[in-house]
Image (cartoon, grey):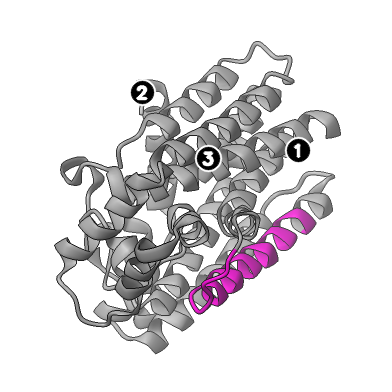
């Protein structure tokens, strides 16, 4: 991320640090504090503040909205980690490992409630519109997670089904962050929708980039072992297209690797990656990712504004596509 984006990120970190979790019962709030301290890119709250600043010139009144988005996002991670049986999050033990599953569920519920409390701090006349958007988005994220879980037991997932799943699970929260920021900053309905469309498309491109990095990223910069999705048979854009495109002996080989419960990690990653390479799936995924990126930029071009925050948003979109972690 460039210097300007890092300044916005730092502001979010400072505001998160101000939240008080030193209250009882400690075992409810300590996991929340722990989760929020793990860091992350803070993309969603940054986008909300940038969108607000484009139209208001002063995003200070949108801080709690941004915090609501970030607390909600991290709540979903607590529950996702339980469902995925994930041991690590950003290089540290997940909450259900450090504490236990019951604590992780309850602390996650507390984060959801806290997100709504932070949202309720907003006093604008369009509060109901923002509340409805936030609630609809929260429900859509749950729908996306449900589809993701259902895909685990299906070998016939279609490409368009996968795109819809990641739209719900990943893209809608980014899009809602931008639209909430725009609405709270005084944008017109047309301007707010343009930013929402930008968020959907950049969110789809973002997830496709994640799918690529898990297979073709550099472990030194990626921050975790390459091939994690392959080893757990996660239905990514690449695997779905491989299952739908491979034939004959290669299809049997792919299905054999998917069926194996015990295997050599490096051997499986290499074998499945070779199938991806034979089908040119890296190039196909990059093309679709770039198509969504271009749609996102086209939507952003509809915002006629000379705010420096709009330029930062363009830079942020570019950095998301160029990232290696």
Q: Quadrant of residue 29?
A: bottom left
Q: Nearer the viewer, mark 3 or mark 1?
A: 3
In the rendered view, does 313 fall on the left or right side of 18? right
Q: Is residue 30 visible?
A: no
Q: CA distance from mark 3 to mark 2?
A: 20 Å
Name the outermost residue toward the front: 248
Q: Nearer the viewer, mark 3 or mark 2?
A: 3
Q: Would you call the spot at circle 2 few (<14 residues within 10 Å), some (14-19), or many (20 or more)?
A: few
| Quarter occupied by the C terminus | top left
Name the residue located 55 percent from the left edge and 54 percent from the top edge: 170
Name the residue located 82 percent from the left edge and 51 percent from the top edge: 129
Q: Which residue is mark 2?
A: 2
Q: Is residue 294 visible?
A: yes
Quick check: 22 above or below 269? below
Which label's residue is closer to the chain start, 3 or 1?
1
Q: Nearer the viewer, mark 2 or mark 1?
A: 2
Please give the range of residues in magenta. 132-157
Q: Which residue is mark 3?
A: 205
Circle 3/circle 2 CB separation < 8 Å = no
Q: Would you call the spot at circle 3 few (<14 residues within 10 Å), some (14-19), or many (20 or more)?
A: many
Residue 280 at x, y percent in the picture: 40, 41
Task: Answer whether residue 133 is magenta in the image.
Answer: yes
Residue 310 at x, y percent in the picture: 59, 20
Numbered disc 2: secondary structure: loop
Numbered disc 1: secondary structure: helix
Circle 2/circle 1 CB separation < 8 Å = no
Q: CA distance from mark 2 to mark 1?
A: 26 Å
Q: Which residue is mark 1?
A: 183
Residue 267 at x, y percent in the picture: 16, 63
- Report the front residue among 302 and 238: 238
């Amino acid at each position: 991320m460039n210097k300007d984006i890092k300044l916005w990120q730092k502001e979010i970190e400072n505001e998160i640090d101000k939240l008080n979790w030193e209250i009882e019962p400690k075992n409810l709030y300590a996991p929340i504090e722990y989760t929020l301290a793990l860091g992350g890119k803070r993309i969603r709250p940054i986008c909300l503040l940038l969108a607000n600043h484009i139209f208001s010139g002063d995003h200070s009144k949108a801080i709690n909205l941004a915090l609501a988005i970030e607390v909600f996002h991290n709540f979903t991670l607590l529950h996702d980690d339980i469902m995925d049986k994930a041991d690590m999050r950003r290089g540290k033990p997940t909450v259900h490992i450090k504490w236990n599953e019951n604590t992780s569920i309850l602390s996650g519920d507390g984060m959801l409630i806290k997100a709504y409390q932070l949202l309720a701090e907003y006093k604008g006349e369009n509060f109901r519109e923002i509340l409805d958007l936030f609630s609809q988005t929260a429900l859509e994220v749950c729908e996306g997670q449900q589809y993701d879980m259902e895909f685990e037991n299906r070998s016939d997932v279609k490409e368009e089904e996968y795109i819809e799943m990641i739209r719900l699970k990943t893209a809608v929260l980014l899009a809602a962050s931008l639209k909430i920021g725009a609405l709270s900053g005084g944008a017109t309905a047309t301007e707010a929708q343009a930013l929402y469309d930008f968020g959907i498309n950049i969110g789809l491109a973002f997830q496709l980039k994640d799918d690529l990095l898990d297979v073709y990223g550099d472990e030194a910069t990626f921050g975790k072992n390459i091939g994690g999705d392959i080893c757990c048979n996660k239905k990514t854009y690449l695997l779905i297209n491989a299952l739908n495109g491979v034939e004959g002996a290669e299809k049997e080989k792919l299905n054999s690797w998917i069926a194996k419960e015990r295997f050599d990690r490096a051997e499986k990653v290499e074998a499945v990656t070779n199938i991806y390479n034979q089908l040119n799936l890296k190039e196909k995924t990059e093309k679709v990712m770039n198509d969504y990126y271009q749609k996102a930029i086209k939507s952003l071009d509809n915002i006629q504004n000379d705010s420096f925050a709009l330029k930062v948003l363009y830079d942020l979109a570019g950095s998301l596509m160029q990232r290696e972690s």
